Image: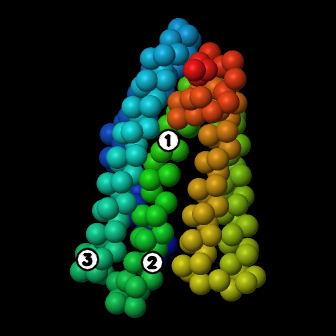
């Protein structure tokens, strides 16, 4: 059931249309050229773009949860579980889509090691959730919820690292200090 839910959500990643790779390329060029104003403006636009994609993703997942029982060859009992998994994915989709911008900024700023460290933490946390699920005999829905919540928490260090470097456009004016990317007002 988890695989079906995640695969359904993975198809929504097609909405990105390659923006992720192109954005990293341009962000990198603007960082090298010290064109921070353009970088911030485009990053804020990119956040809006990914917020919209997250909202679309959320709506599609909710529609599938409400009306999708005839689309999947699973029993009614399995669909009830699947529905809850889709609800969890829908609830987390806007934040997860927005996280793309912070990853793009970190990769463009050559903080790839940090991004990979966060991916390693995510993998280890997934393993921990599996062990906890076995130990506490959590249901499939509980396991998926805790796993999704833990994965969503990994976004915070990426946002904080962007703020520390000063390349988090949504954090403008929130104590970025003397950052070249976030001038104080």
Are dots 3 and 2 in contact, CB under 8 Å? no
**Labels 3 and 1: the sequence-earlier one:** 3
Q: Which mark is residue 84?
A: 2
Q: Position of residue 185 (x, y in %)?
A: 57, 20
Where disc 2 sits, the SS reads helix
Q: Is residue 15 left or right of residue 131?
A: left
**Labels 3 and 2: the sequence-earlier one:** 3
Q: Residue 174 or 13: which is nearer the viewer? A: 174
Q: Give the residue at mark 3.
A: 67
Q: Residue 125 or 54: which is nearer the viewer? A: 54
> Can residue 6 be seen at all in this image of the molecule?
no
Q: Which mark is residue 100?
A: 1
Picture residue at 40% right of the left edge, 46% below the top = 51
Q: Position of residue 42 (x, y in %)?
A: 42, 25
Classed neighbour count for the residue bearing mark 1: other residues with Cα under 10 Å, few (<14), some (14–19), many (≥20): some
Question: Vertically, is 5 above or below 84?
Answer: above
């Amino acid at each position: 059931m988890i695989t079906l839910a995640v695969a359904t959500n993975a198809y929504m990643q097609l909405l990105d249309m390659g923006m992720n790779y192109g954005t990293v390329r341009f962000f990198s060029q603007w960082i090298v050229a010290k064109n921070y104003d353009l970088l911030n403006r485009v990053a804020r636009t990119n956040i809006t773009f990914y917020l919209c994609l997250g909202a679309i993703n959320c709506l599609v997942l909710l529609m599938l949860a409400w009306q999708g029982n005839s689309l999947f060859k699973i029993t009614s009992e399995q669909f009830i579980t699947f529905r809850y998994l889709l609800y969890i994915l829908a609830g987390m989709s806007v934040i997860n889509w927005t996280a793309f911008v912070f990853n793009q900024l970190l990769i463009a700023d050559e903080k790839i090691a940090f991004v990979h460290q966060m991916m390693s933490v995510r993998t280890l946390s997934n393993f921990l959730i599996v062990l906890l699920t076995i130990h506490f005999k959590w249901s499939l829905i509980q396991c998926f919820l805790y796993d999704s919540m833990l994965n969503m928490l990994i976004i915070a260090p990426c946002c904080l690292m962007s703020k520390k470097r000063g390349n988090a456009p949504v954090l403008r004016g929130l104590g970025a200090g003397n950052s070249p990317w976030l001038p104080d007002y």
